[in-house]
Image: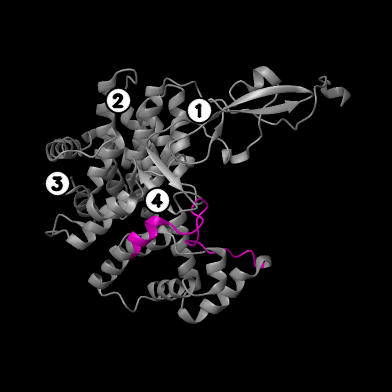
Amino acid sequence: MTERKATLTLDGKDIDLPVMSPVAGPDVLDIRKLYDEADVFTFDPGFTSTASCKSAITFIDGDKGELLYRGYPIEQLAENSSYLETCFLLLYGELPSAEQLADFTTRVMKHTMLHEQIHNFFRGFRRDAHPMATMVGVVGALSAFYHDSLDITDPWHREVASIRMIAKLPTIAAMAYKYSIGQPFVYPKNGLSYAGNFLRMCFAVPAEEYEVNPILEKAMDRIMMLHADHEQNASTSTVRLAGSSGANPFACIAAGIACLWGPAHGGANQAALEQLREIGTVDRIPEFIAKAKDKSSGVKLMGFGHRVYKNFDPRAKVMKESADEVLELLGIHDNPTLQVAKELERIALQDEYFISKKLYPNVDFYSGIILEAMGFPVSMFTPIFAISRTVGWISQWKEMIAENGKIGRPRQLYVGPAKRDYTKVAAR
């Protein structure tokens, strides 16, 4: 860190604020002593201009369209790596050797099963319960079964909890899906890849043999890899905030899943696909685009542009390649929703309005197309996101624990009534 400082002048008093320089990204003003020295807070709704922590895990440059996991560009990882190798990278900071990757993969795959009594939790939900509701409950309940990994001060407990959650989230999500459609649970098969095992648990039935298609397996692995972490987003911040209180790791991840459920966060790919269905047919696209261009209409394009990426989403290019491969494999050409998606994509990449507004198709646009083509209902889109993001949440949680930081306690700008005296009910 540099010795530079900024000076804030308030009521004739100068307050020096240290300037911290990161490896990448804008400089940061250290305001930790601002309240003690000047008796003022900062006001930053959504914390969009506030660095809530120091982190060495993920970096995003929205202007350049750059996403780095531990310094590695996401495009290179998507081309050359796998989801479990990326998990190792996020958790431990470096790419594994062949021996380390084999050991890590074995450790994860040996923890894929759930305690048999956990099956009873699923039967406590209504059949039509959203899989995310089921996941929030079941993941939170894991702390009642795995008492040997709850001590957050013990590095080995933290390690065991991390491996368990990476291993068990796909099983929980697949069981939530199977329960929602009235089919029997399919137990994990550890000889398969992480992504292949998840596909089998979702789509296999006891009456028939199921063979994992390598193209679908690769596409699922990429979806998971591209969503593995994304800096200090809402759900990651939720996990860190819950963890700052000393809550057990299973409770923290359950909190992250609950936050991810929101349509403005993890539900974006579901919203994008539902909008494509709302359009319905290709001939209705001009009408919809006209509404999107009209600010007074209130219509927004779902799956286009990104709050962080100002030029393009680096994940979208990789996801588009997978979308093209999956659609070609499955021979899907006459599906109305996918026809609408293809035409809307073509227009977005050529229309001056879309280009000037930087409304390019983002990762949510393509991932929704892929998942529907695979046969997943929209209700499973966010659970798959939760599976993918679990390693990011855990990596951020472990980093926060290692920092020995304070419990999170945001301040507020109070705008309620001033102090007043209580009036008895008869006198009101």
Q: Nearer the viewer, residue 192 or 323?
A: 323
The residue sitting at 42% across, 62% down in the picture is: 365
**How far is the residue under mark 3 from the one under mark 2?**
25 Å
Magenta stretch: dominant secondary structure: loop
Q: Earlier in the sequence, mark 1 or mark 2?
A: 1
Looking at numbered disc 4 in the image, what kind of residue is underneath it?
Answer: Thr
Q: Which residue is mark 2?
A: 158
Q: Which residue is mark 1?
A: 2
Element type at mark 2: helix
Q: Which residue is mark 3?
A: 189
Q: Residues within 10 Å of mark 3 (few under 14, many from 20)?
A: some
x, y percent for residue 307: 52, 52
Of circles 2 and 4, the one toward us is 2
x, y percent for residue 24: 44, 40
Element type at mark 1: loop
Q: Earlier in the sequence, mark 4 or mark 1?
A: 1
Looking at numbered disc 3 in the image, what kind of residue is underneath it?
Answer: Lys
The residue sitting at 50% across, 69% down in the picture is: 278
Which residue in the rendered view is the most extreme toward the front? 3
**How far is the residue under mark 2 from the one under mark 4?**
26 Å
Q: Nearer the viewer, residue 257 or 410?
A: 410
Q: Earlier in the sequence, mark 2 or mark 4?
A: 2
Of circles 4 and 1, the one toward us is 1
Q: Earlier in the sequence, mark 3 or mark 1?
A: 1
The picture quadrant where one finds residue 250 is: top left
First to last magenta residue range: 297-320
Q: Nearer the viewer, residue 409 or 362?
A: 362
Element type at mark 4: helix
